[in-house]
Image: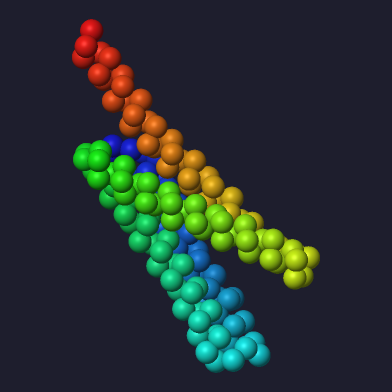
Amino acid sequence: MKNYFYFIVGLIAVFSAITHTIDGFATEIPALNNSNLEHMTQSVFAFNYHIVAADHLGIGIALIIIAFLKNRVIVRSAVWVIIAITFARVVISIITVFASLNVSGNVGTFWIPAIANIICIILLLLGTRLKDKTREYQSENNTK
């Protein structure tokens, strides 16, 4: 394994996909189906819920694979794309928190994804720095 940080974030993303799916089928989708929303609105919410689960699963699997790759250029490019996607998730979570506060005065559990995604971004950034430090250390030792 080349990078434990990427592997850990990959496992977190896969775990998140699994828990998101379980929670969706157990609580969210039944509540949505029993709501007074129009059928099309229910379908859009359900679709978005499934997209988030698929997004978590895809990124998790990609990071687990990336953790074993040796090509630094491809790995760093892919990780920066994943960091950008995860940052977008943080922004959306923060917007949802403030919208919930404004509408109902209660944020519920919307803050949990924001914190989890911030932790994942930090771990991914540490993973990119770890590679840079390792490369610098190796080049310093090779020149001496």
Q: Say how many tags the image has.
A: 0
**Would you identify the image quadrant in which residue 135 lies?**
top left
Direction from residue 136 to residue 142 in the image, left or right: left
Residue 110 appears in the rendering: no
Direction from residue 41 to residue 137 in the image, left or right: left
Residue 136 percent coordinates (x, y): 31, 22
Quadrant of the image containing the C terminus: top left
Quadrant of the image containing the N terminus: top left
Residue 20 percent coordinates (x, y): 50, 66
**Of residues 21 and 91, which is closer to you in this image?**
91
Residue 11 percent coordinates (x, y): 40, 51
For the point 40% across and 67% down, the residue is 54
For the point 55% across and 85% down, the residue is 42
**Would you identify the image quadrant in which residue 59 lies?**
bottom left
Q: How is the image coloured?
A: rainbow
> In the figure, 26 relative to 87: above or below?
below
> In the figure, 117 relative to 35: above or below?
above
> In the current view of this chain or complex, which residue is farthest to the top?
144
> In the figure, 5 relative to 135: above or below?
below
For the point 58% across and 76% down, the residue is 28
Residue 140 appears in the rendering: yes
Residue 97 percent coordinates (x, y): 67, 61
